[in-house]
Amino acid sequence: MKKMLFLFLTVCPQLLLRAQQPVDYVNPQIGGISHLLQPTFNTVHLPHGMVRFTPVKSPGISDHYVALRIFGLPLNQPAHRFPPVVTIMPGMGQPTADPDALASEYDHDFETVRPYYYSVLLEDEEILAEFTPTERCGFYRFSIKNGPFFMVLKGDREADMKIIDNNTIMASATLNGLRQYAYLKFNQPFTESGVIEKNTLKNGRKSIAGDDTGLFVTFSGNGSEPLMLKYGISYIDGDQAKRTLDEQVRGWDFDKIKENGREIWNEAFEQIEVRGGTEDDKVVFYTAVYRTKERMVNINEDGRYYSAYDRQVHHDDRPFYIDDWSWDTYRTSHPLMVILDPAREADIIQSYVRMYEQSGWMPSFPQAYGDMGGMIGHHQAAIISDAWHKGVRGFDIGKAYEGLMKNAMKGTMVPWREGPATELDDFYRKNGWFPALAPGEKETVAAVHPFEKRQAVAVTLEHSYDDWCLSRLASSLGHQDDAKLLMAKAFNYKNVYNPANGFMSPKKADGSWVTPFDPKKDRGPGCRDYFAEINTYTYTFSVQHDVAGLMELMGGREDFIKRLDGLFEEPMYGYCRWTQTADIPDGTGMVGQFVMGNEQGFHVPYLYVYAGAPWKTQKRIRNLMKTWFRNDLMGVCGDEDGGAMSAFYIFSALGFYPVTPGMPVYVIGTPLFEKAVVHLPNGKKFTVHVINNSAQNKYIQSAKLNGKPLDKAWFTHDELMNGGELIFEMGPRPNKAWGTAEAPPSLNFHEK
């Protein structure tokens, strides 16, 4: 063990000697233990790159950090949360095909995780395994003690593996019909090889195809030089995988590839500089930035890309982006991209357009293997409208609008479905609400998923917002009849507000309210009969586009503030936490009935600003950041879906938030750092400078934007992108007069 530790320090001296840079603040292990559902993954990759690495740990252990053994090292993970399609695993002595015998214990104290580099000591055989990626290649280095050793490659579904020569292997396997090819080169020749079939070794054979199959190769090994493996991947064919490897990894200089990855990451991180705060604040912040750059993923390979949306290879020099969970990411990840990299956002939107052209529908959860059709809403409308109204161009807006209108007018709104409308959609478009079933009433629509249910109220609320976004886009493009029709549909949220109980509530097809109705427990696992994963307490405030109208429904400004206060103060369901957790497992990071750990509530703490109480937003946001976003293994309070939760933190730490994507406005919260500089892609800088900031001094006393007093708690996207300086003076007690001069813009139909 001492020998291996010495070797580790020898091959990684720069980690000890180099001055700290932004990339060194990143801790990929944050959130490695989940509060209830999915942990984060300590993914090694380049920003938006095709190759993503996370070690395969003990099966059945949902929280990977506490798993005791490593069962495999991946070539790539084609989709977030999905397992790799091909894995490798080294061993000493005679080869084995037994997965349990191949697995190795490890120790986090001998594991290093950086965005660009991973290493671990496989303790059973004292093999030091290291990995570093390029955009579409991976590079392994194995430091192995004297003696013969072997490498096992295994494929899951429809694997096809072939030994080309005594240094080279071609391998492929599928994920949901998507075939991933890999061309692998070793720096040492094989002394023996064979195939693995049904966990049995068969010497001498050079190829194999089928499910759960693999290859093994052996090496003589004298310990004088490490075994190195480099490979390229492709979704087109094996020849393209080889070309990629030849282009991106020339020679066998592992450290050069690693250092290049480090510099690429530093360049990405340096777009936002933060000063002040605690060391933990910086770690959480830069780790959040890292999380936002895992997805989306560009799968264009040297001017070609394979599209699962028509099962064709296309010739196109423009990037083609996949792996997005739009229900989550429209709220924060995409608005952040609009600021930091609008050109990439244009490429992303054009990718959606091509998916529509190839499949006939705008996607919702576009993956490399096709659209997953996840969650609810047609939120590409929000993504595209937000980008368009913030000045992003460079995509086919006409074709995008065509696709959005088809989804909005002819597509289904049934949760976790895609395609043509059903009778439920026809009802919604005629009557203005998604009809709910009474308790115990049998489902009659075959398209409704038996677990996901109708989610009737949530569907109504989220499509009201999407139709508002699309109405704004239609108006700006001169489609005034469409704009008028869609704007009327944006009012549909009012159809599910029950004034008798003050909550968004399920309404049956005959127009009567569902009874009995418990606003805390609702109905079904995750409240899915009527809502999406959480209850109506948070969903009642899911009216981002018309906060003024919602406020009016609730009785005005003072009553609205009381309702917000009550959201954060209302006790949990039942007498202890588990009673509510059992019914609402997605409801993590709870404060009263408010859910921090799920995306529906991100905008809610900022709604106090609309009611003239921005100081309450300041208190809530600082508390939420410090409580639920931390530098520890449980420091992410919910599922990190496409960087959405991390982007919420980034915005909130900077001191402002996009409450309403589609409206080019940012609502001010409370800045966390003494200074933050956003280096804009147009060459300008937007600086947030904070005077007298501390944990206690969370309240804004006064503000200036470009030298002029700012008496309202919001500013525009143009003001941000034009550069300048936003100065806050902070204090320990609220200045209840600041920020009340003018409420943020909301959907006020009297002005339309």
Image: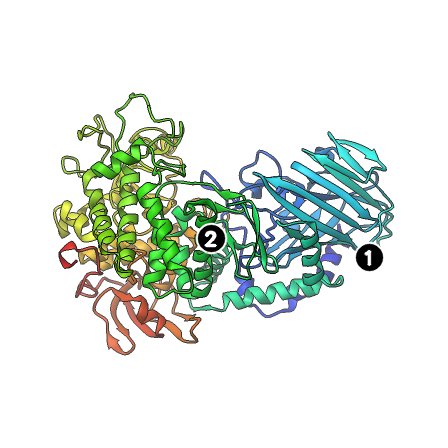
Look at 27% across and 37% down and name the residue there: 457
Closer to the chain start, of discs 2 and 1, is 1
For badge 2, the amino acid type reads Arg
Dividing the picture into quadrants, the one containing residue 417 is: top left
Classify mark 2: residues with Cα within 10 Å, few (<14), some (14-19) or many (20+). many
Look at 48% across and 61% down and name the residue there: 286
Dividing the picture into quadrants, the one containing residue 400 is: bottom left
| Residue positioned most to the bottom | 707
For badge 1, the amino acid type reads Glu
Q: Is residue 641 above or below residue 739?
A: above
SS under mark 1: loop
Q: Kindly check if marks 2 and 1 are in contact, taking CB atoms under 8 A apart as contact.
A: no
Q: Is residue 665 above or below residue 605?
A: below
Q: Out of 360 and 11, give the one closest to the viewer.
A: 360
Estimate the x, y position of residue 749 in percent, counting from the top left: 16, 54
Residue 680 left/right relative to 658:
right
